[in-house]
Image: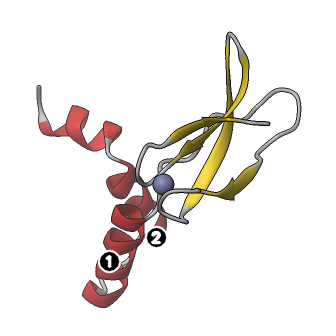
Amino acid sequence: MNDFVDEARSRVAHLLRMANTTDDRVRAQIIEYADTTPEPPVISPRMGIVTTGCSRCLRTAWQQYDSEGPLWVCGTCGHVEPVP
Ligand SMILES: [Zn+2]
């Protein structure tokens, strides 16, 4: 694996490239943002992005679907819970 492959797969590298800045403070903010926010969720074909508060850690849980129906999946702690 070479550097290019690593970079192509890295969300923070993508954000830094979009920001196109050499300002270390801005770059540090972007890295912190990428480290502290969940990966973008898969967008549901039915209703777009739907979120709620995680019942365990109170961060953002994203609505996803599996074969049994809708689920809340927390982007921070990974808690999974059926949508009532
Ligand atoms: Zn959680």
- The image quadrant of residue 43 is top right
Provide residue 66's location: percent of width, then percent of height. Answer: 65, 17
Mark 1 Cβ and ligand 1 under 8 Å apart:
no
Give the crowd class for mark 2: few <14, some 14-19, many >=20 residues within 10 Å: few
Q: Tell me if 23 is positioned left or right of 44 in this view.
A: left
Label 1: state its secondary structure. helix
Give the quadrant of residue 47. Answer: top right
Image coordinates of residue 16 in percent, x first then y, are 37, 64
Mark 2 → mark 1, Cα distance in angstroms:
8 Å
Q: Quadrant of residue 48?
A: top right
Nearest to N terminus: mark 2 or mark 1: 2
Callout 2 touching callout 1 (CB < 8 Å):
yes
Relative height, residue 6 to residue 75 (above, below)? above
Residue 19's disc is 2
The residue carrying pointer 1 sits among few (fewer than 14), some (14 to 19) or many (20 or more) residues within 10 Å by Cα, namely some
Quadrant (top left/top right/bottom left/bottom right) for the C terminus: top right
- Label 2 lies in ligand 1 vicinity (Cβ under 8 Å): no
Q: Quadrant of the N terminus?
A: top left
- Mark 2 vs mark 1: in front: 1
Q: Nearer the viewer, residue 20 or 37?
A: 37
Residue that badge 1 annotates: 27
Residue at 60% from the left image edge and 37% from the top image edge: 81
Q: Is residue 6 above or below residue 26?
A: above
Question: Hey, what amino acid is under mark 1?
Answer: Arg
Which numbered circle lies on residue 65?
Answer: none
Q: Residue 71, how many percent across, how many down?
A: 67, 32
Q: Secondary structure at mark 2?
A: helix
Q: Residue type at mark 2?
A: Ala
